[in-house]
Each structure stands twice: as C-alpha cells, then as structure tokens.
Image: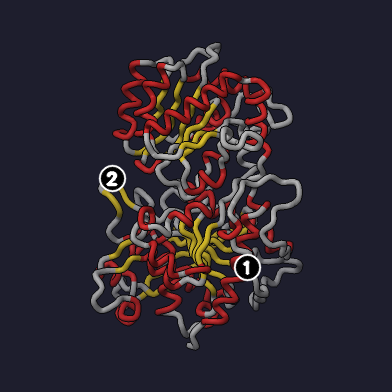
Amino acid sequence: MRVVCIAAECEPWAKTGGLGDVVDALARAVGATGKTGEDTGAVAPTGTRKPRVPQSQVWVGTGAVMGVGKGEAELPGYVEPPVDVFLPKYRGVVAPDWATSRSLAVPDPMAETGTTDVTLVEFEDRGYRVRLIDHPPAFDREGFYGDADGDYPDNGWRFGLLCRAAIEALLTDERPVDVLHLHDWQAMPAVVLRDCAYQAYPLISRAAVMVTIHNLAYQGWLTPDQAADMLFPDELKQALEPRSKGMLLLREGIERAELVNTVSPGYAAEILRPTLGVGLDAALARLGHRFGGILNGLDMGVWNPATDAALPEPYSRAEPAGKATCRRALLSELGFDPDDAGPVLGMIGRLDPQKGFDLLAGAAPDLVADGARLVVLGSGDPSLIGGLSALAKKHPTSVAVIDAFDRDLARRIYAGADLYLMPSRFEPCGQGQMIAMRYGTPPIVHRTGGLADTVEDVDERPIDGTGFVHSAATTKSLLEACRRAVSRFGRGGRDWAGLQDRGMAIDWSWESGPAEQYAASYRRAISLRRENRPTP
C-alpha cells in the first residue's frame, strides 16, 4: 500500500505545534507497519495499557490492500518507503547532505505562462520519504502561515501550489498512489484538484483520500478571487458554485474525501454538535460512518524520562527516585525554595484562549494562598497571562511565568512539577497530558475532547484513575479540581505513588494501536474509492 501525506508541517523540518509531531510520528509508525506487511487490526498488543476509548468511534477497516504498482527502484534489495510526506521548504528548512533535487514544472494560475518551475528536494529519513517543495516566492517568508499583520492573503495560492506540485511529482513517479492522506485545510486543495483537474490521470484519480482534522477551528476560507489564484477557470467552474461567495477548503475536503477523521473519539463526537462544530457539524454529520476519531499516539522514545538528556537525572517507572532530583533542580532554577514541600503546578502551551490560561489566572491567587507554586511556560498573546505575570511580580518565589518557547525547560517542567495543568476549553487530542503521565506528573484537565479520552479522574475511579478532571471550563471548576489534587498530593504515600505509577504504565505509542487503526482506515478508504470512483 502506498500512502502519500500532504501537510503544512512535519517534525523536525517544519513545526509550530502538534500537527508537525503527529505527521512525523504517524508516517514513521505506518511506514514500519507497511514494511512488515502486518495486518493486526486495531487491537493493542497483549499486556499494554491504553485509555478507555469508545470502540464505536474507532474504525476497523476492511478490504484488501492494493498493489504498489510499477516504479520500484532498480537497486538490488531496495524497497521504497511505503509513505511519502510532501511539505513546503520554508525559510530555515535545511535538507540533509544526501538529499537530491530536480526541477518540476507545475501548472500555476498565477504564472503568466500558466506554468511555474519549482524545485523538488527529496530524501529518505526516519523511515519515510520527505519531499520538499522549494519555491521561494511562496515559502521563503517570515512565517509559515502569516506574519505580524496576520495570515498571508495569498495562502490559497501558496498551498494550492504545494498540492499541485505534489501531484505533478507523483505523476512523474509513474507509480500508483493508493491513499492521499491530507492533514488540515492547507492540504485540501489536493482533493479539489483530484476531482477537478486530474480526473483523466488514473495514477491520481484512483487514489482514495483520507482527511485528518487536527483542529476544526482552522478552516481555510478563500474569497472567489483567492480561489481563482489557486484554480484555473475551468477547474474553478467545477469547484465553485455559481452563487458562492467563496471557498471553504476544509469543507471541500470533508465533502470530497472517502474518509474523514479527527484526532480523538471524544473530539469527533463533540464537533458533530453546533456548539463545537464551528459551522461544519452538519457537513460532518452527513458523512455518517465515514467520519470518526482515532486517538493520537505519543513518541515513547522521544518522551522518556529514563533517556531525556534535558533532565538533571534520569528516572523511570521501575526506578522513580530521580524525579525528586528533577523537582529540586526545577525549583532552584526558578528561584523557588527547593526544600518547600508545597505542591508545584506546571502549565505549558500556546498562549491562545482555547488553552485556558485565563482560567488559571483566575484561580492562581487562591492556589498561591493555599501554598501552591505555579510555573507557566508559553508564547503567543501576552495579554492572556497578564494576571499571572502580575501575580509573579507580587510573589516571585511562588509564581514563575516564562513567555518563551523553550523545549528543554518544558521537559524539566514535565519532570519537576508535581501536577500538570490543561484546562483547555476544547482540545482535539492534546499531548501534554500524555507526556505528563509518562513523566509521573498527574494531570488536571477539563473534561473535553482528547483530554476526556485519556485521563481518568482518580476520585471517580479510585482503582485505575490517572489524574483529576473538572467538568466545566470555569475558574471555579478548575480551582475545585486543583484543590482535590493538592489535597491528595499532600497525603502522599502509596496512594500518590500508585497514581503516578498508573500514569507511567500507559503505553501511548503509535505502534500499539493508532498506526494500525490508520492502516485499517486506509484499506477502508481504498475500498470506498473503488466502489464510488467516477469513470474519467
């Protein structure tokens, strides 16, 4: 089975958030599954612990795997990676020494001649093939999506060019594509092009499309003029309704794809309702059984306190003593008293209203009065942590606010804090709570999306609880959960150690379930495309 991913981000080459992590980890895991030829369905291996996920929301696909076709490399014993990842070559993206480059002529509505030359930079790494689209006018810019003035107005052209270049590169391969896996709105031009520009090219038109929505709040709206920068007139006539006021790229992907998923079963259920559907709940509901949720995994090698070089001392579930050293070191680094036994609550994230920093700001004075210490790390809109910053100036030995993106400090917070905060108003999946549990730091989360799928409230489920869950996105609800957590931490002993141990025992790896669920979904998408593909 040949899978082609198109995305705006992929760790470590281009990343602003969780999208990049997921695209990389999934490509590696699915690539490994493809190479071994395993077909084990969506059941985690015996002996692993996974969170409770409603199985009605998880696909177990059916249908035979399609052949990979022609175009195999001629080197003896060489096997092409089963996964390709296309992404832009943004400013600062550096290809490795072994990368190859070639020129590629790409149809372009913005070019005077109708064609633009781009450079295709290709290399294999991490178990899959990376294919960078290098075109400085489109991608050599200050930001991936915009600058200080907002989103780039020509994003439709930019990401349309990415998708068209990817398709043209695939045509030169002369090897059939089984699945186009498109991530978020930036990749949606690919399915529009499949249906409106490449119907006569079986290498592309036969491909099934699977769309993964990482965050429904970002949808890719184009005015008619912006859509005309992305599509030629005949393509635009097919894609755009005559009376349409524009094109919503994510809606196009939802309506044209064989399968659509999001990154947790809980979020999949939530966005079918108007309250969180952001105007697309009806379109998703119309998909019926073709829409569902697959919970993200976690790279268990990258996130491992036993091997994490950023920590002052390694530790593990079997030998957890080093966590105390990490705690003392973090407190000393922040200017807090390392001998103070009061609880340390950490929070890391993008400064966005979604993440609930304002809820913590409202609860913080009471928490500090109760004897807790707070450490907050994040970058973005500083106004969201204004109250916390003011509190930090008033209580410099109890509150620390670091307005920055610091990967190593984030790791030290995961390891050194006693409790981890994720009061997100909504959360498609989230990785912070998984990392925190991996590092023996019980999370405090809002009961929403992937947070509800991954964290069990220990007061509700004393035997297998892994953290603390609050039911409303309010300061009062968060404060109540924090006080429950602080009280349990204060009691310590075997009860607290057991809570930490249960979190550290969970196998979040992509290989233990999500990768197989995606592989099964690919097979199902292929079957649906075979049944419904129009004749060119």
User: Which residue is rendered at x = 32% and y = 34% of the image?
Assistant: 384
Separation of disc 1 and disc 2 at Cα? Answer: 44 Å
Three-letter residue code for mark 1: Gly
Image position, residue 46 (x, y; %):
76, 50
Image position, residue 464 (x, y; %):
65, 37
How many C-alpha atoms fall within 10 Å of the one at disc 1: few (<14), some, or many (≥20)? many
User: Which residue is rendered at x = 38% and y = 43% of the image?
Assistant: 354
How many C-alpha atoms fall within 10 Å of the one at disc 2: few (<14), some, or many (≥20)? few
- Secondary-structure class at tag 1: loop
Q: Is residue 145 visible?
A: yes
Picture quadrant where residue 515 is located: bottom right
Mark earlier in primary sequence (1, 2): 1
In the visual, does 197 lie left or right of 456?
A: left
User: Which residue is rendered at x = 36% and y = 57% of the image?
Assistant: 274
Picture quadrant where residue 41 is located: bottom right
**Looking at the image, what colour scheme do you see?**
secondary structure
**Which residue of the protein is positioned furthest toward the front in this rendering?**
460
354 vs 491, nearest the viewer: 491
- Secondary-structure class at tag 2: loop
Image position, residue 395 (x, y; %):
37, 16
* Image height of 405 relative to 97, above or below: above
Q: What residue did someone put label 1 on?
A: 61
Three-letter residue code for mark 2: Ala
**Which residue of the protein is positioned furthest toward the bottom in this rendering?**
535
So how many labels did they put on this image? 2
Q: Is residue 121 visible?
A: no
187 vs 512, nearest the viewer: 512
User: Which residue is rendered at x = 41% and y = 39% of the image?
Assistant: 472
For marks 1 and 2, give the one nearer the viewer. Answer: 1
Q: What residue did someone put label 2 on?
A: 148
Image position, residue 345 (x, y; %):
49, 26
Q: Quadrant of the N terminus?
A: bottom right
